[in-house]
Amino acid sequence: GGKLSSTTTTTTKTTTPTPTTPPTTWKPLLRGWDEVVTVVEEAILDEFDDDGSQRSYAFLHPIASYYDSKAAVDYYSKAVAEPVSVGEVVGKLIEGKVRGDDGEAYASTRDVDRDVRKVFSNCLGYFGPRGAGRRAHGDADADAYCKLSTHFDAKWRDAVAPVLAKYPGPTALDDDEDDDDDDDVVSAKNAARKSREKT
C-alpha cells in the first residue's frame, strides 16, 4: 500500500489594527426630534410639481451635489459664509452625536430652526438683487430660487412654531429620562429642580 503523506500546517498570528481615529462620542437625542423631522417632511419635503419633481430639491443637499465643477463650488463658498442644507440639518438632528469635525449635536429646537432658516436666507442672499448667484445664473433663475426660498421659509416658520413653543429651551434627553414622559411628569421634574436651586 501507499504511504501517507505528511503535511506541515503553519499558523499565522493575526493582529488587530490599532484605531487611528478617536472613537465616536454619542450625544443624547434632542427631545422632540421626531416632531421636528415630521415638520421638515410636511413643510418642505412633501411638495411636488406637476411632473412629480420635488420642489425643495435645491435645498436638500450640500452645494457640491449640484455643480460639476470645483470652480462653481468655490464661487458659491466665497459668497456664502455658512452654507447648510436641509439634509445636513436632519442628519445632525437624527444622529444626535459629535463625529469628527461635524460639530456639536443640537442643544435645542431653536438651534434646528436657526439652521433651517439659514438654508433659505443663504439662498435669498446668494440670488438676491446684489447676490453673486444672480450675476452667475441670470435674473430668471435667481428670481425662481428666491421665490422658492420665501415660500418654504414661510411654510417652515408656521409649521415649526408649535414645536418651538412646546420645547423652548435646551431639551436633550438625559440618560435617566424617558422620551415618553408626559407633560405632568416633566412639569414635576422642573418644579423639583427649581426647588433644589432655591435651597
Image (cartoon, rainbow, N blue to C red):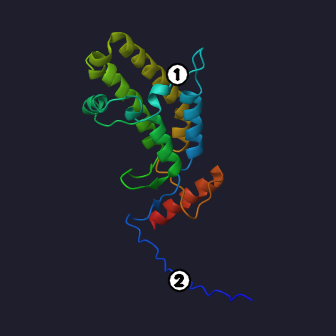
Which residue appears at 60% of the width and 19% of the height? 52
Q: Give above or below for 16 relative to 144.
A: below
Label 2 amino acid?
A: Thr
SS for dot 2: loop
Q: Nearer the viewer, residue 105 or 12?
A: 12
Q: Which residue is mark 1?
A: 55
Q: Earlier in the sequence, mark 2 or mark 1?
A: 2
Residue beneath the point at 37% across and 10% down: 140
Residue 15 in percent (x, y) is at 46, 76
Q: Nearer the viewer, residue 20 or 24?
A: 20
| Quadrant location, the N terminus | bottom right
User: What is the crowding at mark 2: few (fewer than 14 residues within 10 Å), some, or many (at least 20)?
Assistant: few
In this rendering, the answer to whether 153 lies above or below 110 is above
Residue 10 is tagged as 2
Residue 23 vs residue 6: left or right? left
Which residue, as the protein is rendered here, is positioned at the far right? 1
The image shows residue 36, relative to residue 68, as above or below, that is below
Q: Identity of the amino acid at label 1? A: Arg
Q: Position of residue 48 (x, y in %)?
A: 58, 21
Q: How far from the left and from the top, in percent, is residue 21?
A: 38, 63
The residue drawn where x is 31% and y is 24% is 126
CA separation, marks 2 and 1?
A: 63 Å
Report the residue that reaches farthest toward the top. 140
Q: Is residue 56 visible in this depiction of the protein?
A: yes
Horizontal side, residue 65 vs residue 55: left or right: left
Q: Nearer the viewer, mark 2 or mark 1?
A: 2
Can residue 168 be seen at all in this image of the molecule?
no
Coordinates of residue 51 in the picture (x, y in percent)? 59, 15
